[in-house]
Amino acid sequence: MIEVNGRRYAAPKQATVIVCVDGCEPDYIAQAVAAGQMPTMKRFLAEGTALVGDCVVPSFTNPNNLSIVTGAPPSVHGICGNYLFDVDSGTEVMMNDPKWLRAPSILAGLADSGASVAVVTAKDKLRKLLGHGMKGICFSSEKAEQATVPENGIDNVLPLVGMPVPDVYSAELSEFIFAAGVRLLETRRPDIMYLSTTDYVQHKHAPGDPDANRFYAMLDRYLMRLDQLGAVIALTADHGMNAKTKLDASPNVIFLQDLLDGWLGRERTRVILPITDPYVVHHGALGSFATIYLPADAASEIAARLRGLIGVEVVLTRAEAAARFELPADRIGDLVVVSERSVVLGTSRSRHDLSQLELPLRSHGGISEQRVPIILNRPIPNLDANRRWRNFDVFDLALNHAQ
C-alpha cells in the first residue's frame, strides 16, 4: 500500500493497464458498440464496470493526464493547461517541463515501492511530465526510434513493436501505443502500465463516423488481447470532443483579444489559450477555455460585457474559477472564460492560421467536454454509481477495487 497526494493505493496483484483515450466523448464508444465494431467493449460494459464521470476543466490533455496519474485535480499537481502566462518571467510558455509539477505521481510511487511500471504516450511533450520521478519504461510513439535505456528505460522499441514510427497526424500514432502495450505485456509483463493516446481521430471525425468506428474497432482488438493476457484494464479519457461550427460549417470563434483591444485599447490585456501546443492542425489553437490578464479596475466591467456575449457559457473571477474548477489560482488570469458547446475562443483573428483545419472544426476545453467514460473489464460489487466519479479516480478503482 502506498500513499500519494492524500490517497492510498494497493499494489497491483495482477498486471494492470490504465488506458487514457484522448478526446473520447462517451458517444464514440456507444456508436461503435451499436455498429458492432467493439465486441470486447460490449462484453466489458455487460460484465465489468461502466461509469460516466467528469474530467477536470479546462478539459485539455495535459491537465487531465496529470490528474489521472496523480489522482488529484490541478490545484494539487499544478498543471492547469498545455500553455500558460508565466507572471514571474512575463512570458507565455508551454507547460511540458516537469518544473511546473507540484505533486508526485502514482506511477512514481508504485515504482518506488518495487512495482515494475511502463508508460507509453503519443507525443513526447507529455512523456516527460508523465515519467517525472518514475523508475521504469517511459517513451512516446512520436519518438519511439530514439528511445534509450538511460532516458526511457528501454531501447530497440521499433523491432519490439513491429511498426514504423507513425506520422504525428495519424490514427497510427495511437495504434502504436496499443501495439507497444501488448508487446510489453507479452514480453516484460510490467505490474502497472499507462497508455495515453492522441485525439487526432476525434478532432476529425464525429461519433459514428466510419473512420471513428474504425479507430474504435482497432482499439477493441488490442483491448481483447490485453484482456486475454489477464490484465485488469481500466479505460477513461482526458476530455470529450464537440463540433465547434456555425451553420455553414465554418469555425464558430469568439476572438477575445480583438474584443478586449476594442474595449480597453491595445496592450492593456492578455488572453491566454491553454489549449495551445505545437500541433495546430488538430485545432488551430482554438478551444473552449481562456484566461485573461487585465487591469484590476477593469475586471468587473469586462466580466459583465463578456457575460453578455452570445456563445459565452460562464465568466469567473480568478478566485471563483480556482474554487469551481480546482485550479491553482496563481497560474490563471484575472478572469476565466468558458464558451458554450458549439463555440471556441481565440485571441486575435490574425494570430490563428485556420488554413490547415479540416472542416468542421472539432475541439474541447469547456464544461461541455467534461463527461468521459470510466470502464473496467472487472466488476466492482456495491459500487455507488450515483456519486460523482472523476477520471482521476481510475487508479483507485483499478488498484483498490478491481483486483
Image (spheres, rainbow, N blue to C red):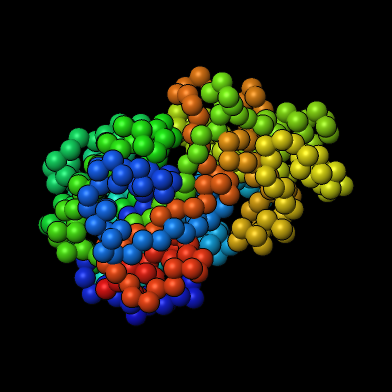
The residue positioned 34% from the left and 80% from the top of the image is 1
Relative image position of residue 334 (x, y in whole percent): 74, 50
The total of numbered circles placed on residues is 0
Name the one closer to the observer, 189 or 316: 316
Residue 105 visible (yes or no) = no
On screen, residue 311 above or below 75: above
Tell me if I can see residue 240 in this picture: yes
Residue at x 41% of width, y 49% of height:
26
Q: Nearer the viewer, residue 25 or 300?
A: 25
Q: Residue at x 73, y 28 (%)?
A: 258
> Where's residue 127, x and y in %?
37, 50
| Residue drawn at 67 percent across, 30 percent down | 255
Quadrant of the drawing holding the C terminus: bottom left
The percent coordinates of residue 274 (x first, y second) are 57, 43
Nearer to the camera, 49 or 179: 49
Depth check: 238 or 333 in front?
238
